[in-house]
Amino acid sequence: MSLSPTFLLTAIIFTPALGALFLAFFNKKAVEPMRMTALVFTVVTFMLTLFLLNDFSAAEPGIQPVQEDGTRGVSHVWIESWNINYQLGYDGISVPLVLLTSFICMLAMLASWSIEKQVKGYLILYLLLETGMLGVFLALDFFLFYVFWEVMLLPMYFLIGIWGGPRKEYAAIKFFLYTLAGSILMLIAMLMFYFGSSNLPGGSSFDILALTQIGQGNVAGITFDRTVQITAFILLFIGFAIKVPTFPFHTWLPDAHVEAPTPISMILAGVLLKMGGYGILRIAFPICPVGAQYAAYALVVIGAVSIIYGAFAALAQTDFKRLVAYSSVSHMGYVLLGIAVWKIGEDSAAVGRDYWLMGMNGAMFQMLAHGVSSAGMFFMVGVIYDRVHHRDLNQFGGLAGLMPVYTGLAAGIFFAGLGLPGLCGFIGEVFVILSAWNYSPVLAIIAASGVILTAGYILWTIQRVYLGPEYKGPHAEAIVPMNYREMTVGAILLVFAIILGIYPESMFGIMRESMAYLVQSLDQGYQNYAAAVQSTSEAISGILK
Amino acid sequence: MDFNTLVERVVHDTTQVSLWLFAPELVLCVTIVLLLFVRLFNADRFIPTYWMALLGALVSFMFSLTQFYQLRTEVLDSSTFFTGLLVFDQFTAFFRLFLSLFLTFVVALTVLSGIPDEEDGPDFYALLLGSTIGMMLMTSANHLLMLFLAVEMTSVPSYAMVGFLKGRKLSSEAALKYVVYGAGAAGVMLYGLSLIGGLLGTANLPEMADRINMIVSGEAGMSDATVRTLMLAALMVLVGVAFKLSIVPFHFWCPDAFEGASAEVAGFLSVASKGAAFALLVRFCLALIGDPSGASLSNMYVSLGIGIGVIAAVTATFGNLAAYAQTNIKRLLAYSTIAHAGYMLMAVGALLVILNAPADSGINVHTEAIRCIEGLLYYLFVYMFMNLGAFAVVALIRNEIFSEEISDYAGLSQQAPALCICMAIFMFSLTGLPPLGGFFAKLVIFASLFKAGTVHWSMWAILAIGGLNTVFSLFYYIRVLKAMFIAPATEQSKRVAVPTIASAYIITVSVPVVLLGIAIQGLSQTAQDVANVILP
């Protein structure tokens, strides 16, 4: 079956929104039918993303689909007077993330049976959130990207604010304010690009592909000069770093994750954090290679600090969910580290470009692996929280005897988060640390030591929660084995953690060409810039002579 | 020319040309007269007066629409009428359309919310319509005298409307405050107008720029006494406009007046008088500058633009910060109104800076100036719906729970979901979040500020402040939503049953807010065309 690309991409993005609209007509007392309907819509969306995977050609490095006239992506005029297009497309970077999104959304919907308050509102917002996330990963017009980026904020505020824990209001507003502040910075960078591209044949543009070509110096007559690139990169980076989140922009995360209901925590950790990394890979680096190279060292340091800081913070937690939240900060540090290990030599070409590529691949893999493992960890916390209504690590213990299946699944997932070889967390971390050695051995050692800390807090957690003689905390009577729904979610996540761990090629195969192309074009873009500077200075010295 | 010919000409000009161009206002005038007659003969017992007002507003809207369409299709041309006192062009027609559409919505709201009651209907609608006529005149004023008369004609009925809830002390106090401030501002403005008229020897707006170039030679600066007087006069006129716009430091009346007045009146004042005042401000500024390439005071105008920009930034910041502390929803919305006036004023500042950009700045003055005005017009149009919507929700909820305190909104989303969801749309649009109209409006203004920054760096600073303000403002808008959606209903909460028709009204108002954030092209293009017409 072959669908027109525009239709398929639009369907992927808006099927959940359609579901939300559909749900609006339900009687609010029909809780179970509404849940089933919402689940059906997430499953359909997942199926559609599988169609996308089917259409995707792994050998093609650039944006797909490639039209007959050679243009990439699909594009339809949206706002003519501003040259804004409804432009969508996918490549090896976005396809895995789209799959991850629809996959996690489906599982988190299964986990949403635990929500019992105002179910109708919850499901509608949940589906709108999914639309926003998928839109971000598929949009290729900066304006459209920005719109989806913000669309995802509104439901999130309410999902945390209405269905969250005791400090939900504080957490929700904090999340909203942080992200909005980042968005405003992104908006300013967006305007810089828009006005900077006014010499394009079609006038100023928000087209990410066109802006990328300008930024990499491939368009005759228009460039973003060094100052523009550095300023724009910093603005964009802060915007995305808030989302990743990296130290020091991470403080919204523990609050939001802890207060959010379990399924929303799964989505926050599993998908939302990836949007920051995706933004860096899709927008900040490609459009501003000079700015990215300028800031590379700082980024690597921030990445390494995030790893260590997140791990130490996790060690200090007594709240189970907060511990998992800080582990996210630590794990996402690897992503930033892997992306940024761009070392250049005298001739401004990348030194050891293959290592950098390895880092990029590792970072991308880490995003996917973390998407699976952190969603799993939050789910595991949620399962026990639903039973005993507390998350104090010091009051757990002995769950292995009471809930053996749960303990088995949870241990598997937590080991995946730890980065045990054979599970998904290992691949990304190893790739990133190996590539970091090429960049700076000191930073590589620091980052690698994070692995020990990770092992420390995860093993300690397992010991405190699952091992031990008996459970002494409150609500001991409520501890019952997992039901089938919970088991399904947990088992699927663990299976995928194992598949990704023993057969990483499943994901590397999709992303390899696109990543290689990205690295190659960034390298070339920087060299173009350096050559231009070189020729200008030669011309000036020629005149002086 | 003997007297008879003169009279004949005036009669001809009036009856053949002007009256048709004046039709939207004329319809409102006739409606007012009818309203008063109905009262005189006690016929208002049989014909509800709001139907008459609604009909008048609708007919006026239809006329405005027809005229706008005729202008767009070039059946009619831009011209001046009533012997040059008023001007008729797309800009006028756009604002008439804006005002009459808004008037229709406000009258419909008053029908639903029951303020005014049957007894007071004729008086209230006469004031409302009269004020709207004044606003329409403001947007078409072509003469300093007209300008002043229009501002006064807008203000006087507004004072009365603010004090319309006669029994309430708060209301009378608000009206009094408004009158005193208004009279002061009007006096200052009139003095400024007289200075300009005296200096230039003309009160005709289109002639001002030429006269200025005549009396000011070469690169005159503040050391020149004429320039100094002229700038002082311009500032005084701006004071008058700033009062209408509730720009810091002329904003003090606004929160008190809005708190004292009923939500319907506050909604009307917050949108309509702002729209008209911005139209007036743009016309005045453009008249002052004339053809930008030939203006001898370019540097002064750039400084003026920066000054306006700085005041705009201060206004937005002040409005947003002051709104934090409010517990009364109408006061909160009043401060939000002040902040929005600040955002919109930024576009005017950017316009002045761009129009007077030095020749070597490398920007396309015409295109960029169009962008500034496009931003202003788009913002006003979206603002009309989102602000009216917010005030309408306040009015309708007040009818149910008899309170305007934010804390009393707790748990409302369970009882009146449609109203609360629409309120969320309005609040997010006021914050400026996509995919709602408020976002695109703000983006255009930010874009014009960004471009103005290439002429003078201070515009970038103002842009940064504007961006920061967006983040600030989220905090208090969301407080309202937090009360509605997150806070649990208290024991004292009253049962709320909003009539279906009222919910339908609110949904009708919220639809354009969403649409203007998605189907942007139509209004964006229209606003650009309108801007193209009035720019030199």
Image (cartoon, coloured by chain):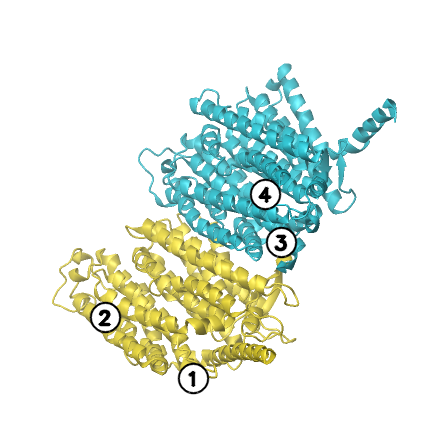
Chain colours: A yellow, B cyan
* Mark 3: secondary structure: loop
Q: Nearer the viewer, mark 2 or mark 3?
A: 3
Is residue B191 positioned above or below A160 on the image? above
- Residue furthest top as drawn: B41
Whole-angstrom CA distance, mark 3 to mark 1, is 47 Å
Q: Are marks 1 and 4 in contact (CB under 8 Å)?
A: no
Q: Are marks 3 and 1 on the same chain?
A: no
What residue sits right under mark 2 in the picture? A458
Q: Residues within 10 Å of mark 1 (few under 14, many from 20)?
A: some
What residue sits right under mark 1 in the picture? A351
Whole-angstrom CA distance, mark 1 to mark 4, is 60 Å
As drawn, the label of residue A401 is none
Q: Are marks 2 and 4 in contact (CB under 8 Å)?
A: no
Rendered residue at 54%/62% (across/down): A192
Query: What kind of residue is marked 3?
Result: Ala
Query: What kind of residue is marked 2?
Result: Ile
Is residue B172 positioned above or below B72 on the image? above
What residue sits right under mark 3 in the picture? B357
What residue sits right under mark 4 in the picture? B222
Q: Nearer the viewer, residue B337 or B107?
A: B337
Pointer 1 chain: A
Residue B256, by quadrant, is top left
Query: Which quadrant: the C terminus of chain A?
Result: bottom right
Q: Are marks 2 and 3 on the same chain?
A: no
Q: Are marks 2 and 1 on the same chain?
A: yes
Query: What kind of residue is marked 4?
Result: Met
Instruction: Report x, y in % for residue A310.
Output: 28, 67
Observer able to see residue B230: yes
Q: Are marks 3 and 4 on the same chain?
A: yes
